[in-house]
Amino acid sequence: MSADIIDGKAFAATVREKVAMHVARMVEEHNLKPGLAVVLVGEDPASQVYVRNKGKQTAESGMASFEHKLPADTDEATLLGIVEQLNADPSVHGILVQLPLPKHLNSDLIINTIAPEKDVDGFHVVNVGRLGAGLKSMVPCTPLGSLMMLKDYHGDLSGKNAVVIGRSNIVGKPMAQLLLGANATPTIAHSRTANLQEVVREADIVVAAVGRPEMVTGDWIKPGATVIDVGINRIPAPEKGEGKHRIVGDCHYESCAAVAGAITPVPGGVGPMTIACLLANTVTAAARSAGLPEPEGLTV
Ligand code: NAD
């Protein structure tokens, strides 16, 4: 195995340190305590784990953490009412509605009811549009964390060919926008892309956000390329015991690492950066709400 390992866990710890430093300074100098409100509807076990981790890390960084746990049969009017209440609450600077929502709720309507300046997930159409237009926005956390790692590893991304596999609004599309903003030349590949392997083999940077365990193998990767594996897939692991699982990415780690110049592991790559960037976005939102300068080191 020859690739450098891009250690997202360690990087996320440095982002969290910066977050805590900015929070301490904002509290001390401006009497401003950034606050993040997370709304969880229903009892999806993965979402419960995410929300618990987010709440814990928010509090550890010195911010205020607010959790709203609602039953799965919560109606739309009730949820919209809570979002409106958080929009109006001056102690809340960031609002996150945990997705996926139960099917009877209109996710687009709910996300687009969050005040854009408090939309720390960056999913509101105003933030999507602002990112596309190259304006100051709230940037979705997973692509933000991925770009931070790429910039940290490479410095300048000018002239690099980047292939993003996956065109979701949460990862693929904003990732491509960020790469474009960083002067790379992005291609968005997806389930209907012809000759996917050949397209990927042209890339200096591969970002895999597909949701298919270990789909990308070493023979897809140009020697020396950088691989950012966004995928989080739970697969059976009978070798660990009956009914056990393990987490793998969208890239086959061993074969890709044998060819790539650098790679993010799963777990321990993009995942920890995503939560760190949520905290970073909340601090940025709080600073903007008070007309303070952009906190250093928390955006790209
Ligand atoms: P999604 O299902 O919304 O989108 C997947 C995309 O992959 C689609 O655009 C589709 O066109 C493309 N695709 C599907 N099959 C393909 C194929 N055979 N070839 C090429 N493209 C194909 O998923 P998402 O929300 O973007 O998430 C993608 C992955 O990233 C999932 O594994 C998810 O768990 C993970 N994820 C991780 C984090 C994190 O914090 N690390 C955050 C969000 C998502």
Image (cartoon, grey):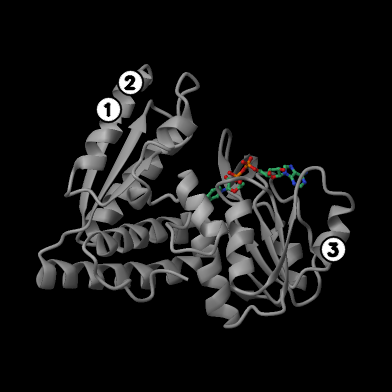
State which quadrant residue 198 falls in.
bottom right
Q: Which mark is residue 177?
A: none
Q: Are marks 2 and 1 in contact (CB under 8 Å)?
A: yes
Q: Are marks 3 and 2 in contact (CB under 8 Å)?
A: no
What x and y, as percent, mark residue 217?
78, 58
State which quadrant residue 297 falls in.
bottom left
- In this rendering, would 183 be left or right of 224? left
What amino acid does circle 2 point to?
Answer: Ala
Q: Which residue is mark 2?
A: 77
What amino acid does circle 1 point to?
Answer: Gly
Label 1: which secondary element: helix
Number of callouts: 3
Q: Which residue is mark 1?
A: 81
Quadrant location, the N terminus = bottom right
In the image, residue 167 sits, relative to residue 177, either above or below, namely above
Q: Which residue is mark 3?
A: 219
Q: Residue at x 30, y 34 (%)?
A: 83
What amino acid does circle 3 point to?
Answer: Asp
